[in-house]
Image (cartoon, helix red, strand yellow):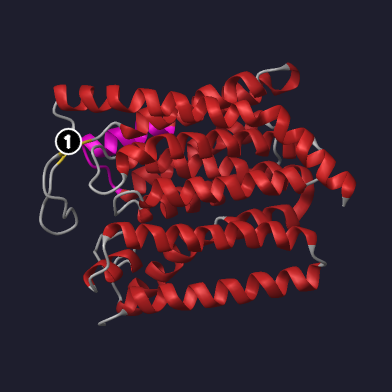
């Protein structure tokens, strides 16, 4: 344990500028993105159904998140053998943000978006010289993560806060993990993503002055997937499973929505306002209360993932199963209330 704490402290002391720089850049760039969005009328307009906000709200928050994330990862990873990986991550991040921005301006079909996300996922995986199994894993996890973050981006402050907390959980997992290059990459990616998400959050809390749009939610999904996949390449299946657990709230929200739509025979990609956060809002919860409870649940998963890493395998599995079942049942009940 002393060696573990010493190693974790040393890594944190070395990489804290990643968190700070990504936070500061996103915090500084977001107002400029809001002004540009207003100047060119890139706004999300309420429709009284899926978009219940009261006034047209600027997009382009995703561009600010991209700027902070890129500034966070580029200096720390672009050394030696990681140069190609860094370039691949930056290109893929720019591509997925552009995809989301295009969807914000002119909606794309779900099939086109998923196909494009799959192609984007291949870029960093090929830079890692991944084999066929790793390529399939990268595509699957990136597609699921992007879908999950896109799904929870339905209420002010929700996606940025939840993903930021999940990213901090992944950073903690990297700190307590083995002293490997894969965990070092995971730490940098997680800290950069957390800093960018939290830098955007003050502008996105209720009532939001700017939305991240699909540009931001897809980038956050790609970023979290990249961080989860790094320990998987260096630390085997347990590293990936604990990383997925740290991202548990968005994944469970996605699972609850898919289960509900399958049960009712509705198209999986058809939007609605029956997600868990919509149900809580319909019961009179304020947007800040919904976000606060969601942050607490995200923190529970993040902390649980760190604890599970330190436990023997049977105890870790039991912990993950109990937390997942309890929160999953709660979200399922919320998503199916009134049906």
Image quadrant for the C terminus? bottom left
SS label for mark 1:
strand
Q: Is residue 101 visible to us here?
A: yes
Q: Nearer the viewer, residue 154 or 165?
A: 165
Seen in the picture, residue 333 relative to 206 is either above or below; the reply is: below
Residue 87 inside the magenta-drawn segment: no
Q: Main secondary structure of the magenta part?
A: helix
Residue 113 picture location, percent across and down? 36, 43
Magenta range is 96-109
**Residue appearing at x 58%, y 21% in the figure:** 74
Image coords of residue 185 (percent x, y): 68, 34
Q: Going 52% across and 46% down the picture, which residue do you hit?
A: 142
**Does residue 213 show up?**
no
Residue 232 on image: x %, y % = 71, 47
Relative to 115, residue 69 above or below = above
Residue identifier under label 1: 43
Query: Residue at the spot x=45%, y=57% of the render?
Result: 295
Towards the viewer: 314 or 133: 314
> Is 134 placed above or below 154 here?
above
Answer whether residue 102 is magenta in the image: yes
Residue at figure coordinates x 37%, y 57% from the top left: 291
Mark 1 surroundings within 10 Å by alpha-carbon count, few (fewer than 14), some (14 through 19), many (20 or more): many
State whether residue 213 is above or below residue 245. Answer: above
Closest to the observer, 209 or 312: 209
Give the side of residue 314 with respect to residue 136, left or right.
Answer: right
């Amino acid at each position: 344990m002393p060696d573990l704490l010493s190693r974790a402290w040393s890594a944190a002391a070395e990489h804290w500028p990643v968190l700070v720089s990504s936070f500061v850049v996103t915090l500084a760039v977001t107002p400029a993105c809001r002004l540009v969005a207003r100047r060119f009328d890139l706004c999300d307009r309420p429709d009284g159904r899926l978009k219940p906000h009261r006034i047209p709200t600027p997009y382009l928050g995703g561009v600010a998140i991209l700027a902070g994330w890129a500034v966070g990862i580029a200096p720390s990873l672009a050394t030696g053998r990681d140069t190609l990986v860094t370039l691949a991550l930056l290109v893929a991040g720019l591509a997925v943000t552009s995809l989301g921005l295009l969807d914000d301006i002119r909606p794309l079909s779900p099939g086109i978006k998923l196909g494009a996300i799959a192609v984007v996922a291949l870029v960093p995986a090929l830079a890692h010289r991944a084999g066929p199994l790793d390529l399939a894993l990268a595509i699957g996890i990136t597609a699921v993560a992007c879908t999950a973050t896109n799904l929870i981006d339905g209420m002010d402050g929700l996606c940025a806060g939840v993903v930021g907390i999940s990213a901090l959980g992944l950073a903690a997992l990297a700190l307590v993990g083995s002293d490997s290059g894969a965990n070092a990459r995971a730490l940098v990616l997680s800290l950069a993503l957390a800093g960018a998400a939290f830098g955007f959050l003050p502008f996105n809390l209720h009532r939001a002055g700017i939305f991240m749009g699909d540009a931001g939610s897809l980038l956050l999904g790609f970023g979290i997937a990249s961080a989860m996949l790094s320990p998987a390449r260096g630390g085997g299946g347990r590293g990936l499973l604990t990383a997925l657990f740290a991202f548990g709230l968005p994944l469970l929200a996605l699972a609850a929505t898919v289960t509900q739509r399958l049960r009712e025979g509705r198209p999986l990609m058809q939007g609605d306002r029956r997600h868990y956060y919509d149900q809580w809002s319909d019961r009179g919860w304020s947007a800040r209360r919904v976000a606060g409870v969601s942050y607490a649940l995200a923190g529970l998963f993040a902390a649980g993932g760190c604890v599970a890493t330190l436990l023997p395998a049977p105890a870790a599995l039991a912990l993950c199963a109990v937390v997942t079942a309890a929160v999953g049942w709660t979200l399922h009940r919320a998503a199916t209330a009134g049906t």
